[in-house]
Image: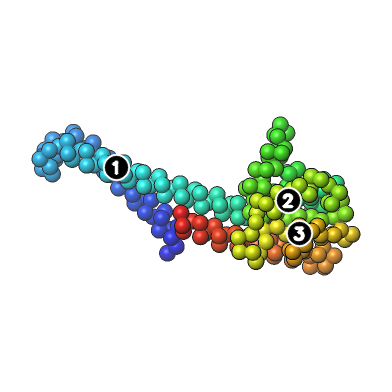
């Protein structure tokens, strides 16, 4: 049985025990004979059960918070932030669809940012809540100051822990070049016939690494 499953069972058992202790405490208050049968001092019984209830409830809450934190990390581990020049919006939507069909949750600004939101803050939050970035490199990318700044932010925020699988995947289209800051990372060549399949496979591999790291965080937590 996995540790997460054991924690869920313990949480439920503690919650049930806490509820039972609280109920028994109320029963003892109302039933003097029961209190006297178990303890000479009814106040001692009530205090003991109250403390037991409080400890059980606190422990159950801590376990639930840990489970919620792990779930958030797992959601982040399956999210990919799409970086592109805005002139390539149609191309970005095509890649987003391919990733989504492959079971990946892409974060694309034109889909995620609603009217009225402060777009810089929304993009920063999107980067923070994504485990990795997919960078679309076209002749227009290197001319886009905004895209290049997003690339720098992605590298800064998503530095690989194991230095083997990068959380930033360059996707190279015809006529484009790989910027120096991404030159050390193996890119997806979109002129290949199997390019989309290779991209999805590469993203899954990178995300699997993030999931493993997430599990380690959960074990330490």
Across and down, in percent, residue 7 comes to: 41, 55
Residue in the picture at 17% in, 36% down:
43
Q: CA distance from mark 1 to mark 3?
A: 55 Å
Judging by the rendered image, the residue that carries numbered circle 3 is 182
Across and down, in percent, residue 178 comes to: 81, 60
Across and down, in percent, residue 82 comes to: 73, 51
Quadrant for residue 213, please give it.
bottom right
Judging by the rendered image, the residue that carries numbered circle 1 is 53
Q: CA distance from mark 3 to mark 2?
A: 10 Å
Secondary structure found at label 2: helix
Earlier residue among tags 3 and 2 = 2
**Which tag is nearer the camera, tag 1 or tag 3?**
3
Across and down, in percent, residue 46 comes to: 20, 38
Q: Identify which residue, 206 or 37, lies in the foreground.
A: 206
Q: Which mark is residue 166?
A: none
Classify mark 3: residues with Cα within 10 Å, few (<14), some (14-19) or many (20+). some
**Which tag is nearer the camera, tag 2 or tag 1?**
2
Secondary structure found at label 1: helix
Residue in the picture at 82% in, 68% down:
193
Q: Residue furthest top?
A: 116
Q: Is residue 101 visible?
A: no
Judging by the rendered image, the residue that carries numbered circle 2 is 152
Quadrant for residue 181, please give it.
bottom right
Contact check, label 1 and label 3, Cβ < 8 Å: no
Residue in the picture at 81% in, 45% down:
145
Q: CA distance from mark 2 to mark 1?
A: 51 Å
* Quadrant, the N terminus: bottom left
Classify mark 2: residues with Cα within 10 Å, few (<14), some (14-19) or many (20+). few
Secondary structure found at label 3: helix
Earlier residue among tags 2 and 1 = 1
Earlier residue among tags 1 and 3 = 1
């Amino acid at each position: 049985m996995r540790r997460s499953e054991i924690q869920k069972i313990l949480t439920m058992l503690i919650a049930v025990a806490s509820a039972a202790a609280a109920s028994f405490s109320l029963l003892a208050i109302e039933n003097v004979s029961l209190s006297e049968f178990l303890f000479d001092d009814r106040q001692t019984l009530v205090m003991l059960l109250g403390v037991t209830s409080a400890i059980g409830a606190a422990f159950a809450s801590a376990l639930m918070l840990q489970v919620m934190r792990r779930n958030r990390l797992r959601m982040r581990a399956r999210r990919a932030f799409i970086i592109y020049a805005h002139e390539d919006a149609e191309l970005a939507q095509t890649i987003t669809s391919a990733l989504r069909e492959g079971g990946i949750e892409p974060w694309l600004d034109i889909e995620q940012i609603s009217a009225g939101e402060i777009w810089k803050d929304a993009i920063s939050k999107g980067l923070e809540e994504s485990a990795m970035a997919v960078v679309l490199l076209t002749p227009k990318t290197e001319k886009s100051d905004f895209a290049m700044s997003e690339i720098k932010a992605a590298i800064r925020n998503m530095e690989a822990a194991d230095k083997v699988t990068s959380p930033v995947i360059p996707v190279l289209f015809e006529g484009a070049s790989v910027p120096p800051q991404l030159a050390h990372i193996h890119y997806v060549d979109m002129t290949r016939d199997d390019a989309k399949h290779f991209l999805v496979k590469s993203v899954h591999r990178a995300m699997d690494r993030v999931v493993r790291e997430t599990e380690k965080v959960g074990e330490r937590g």
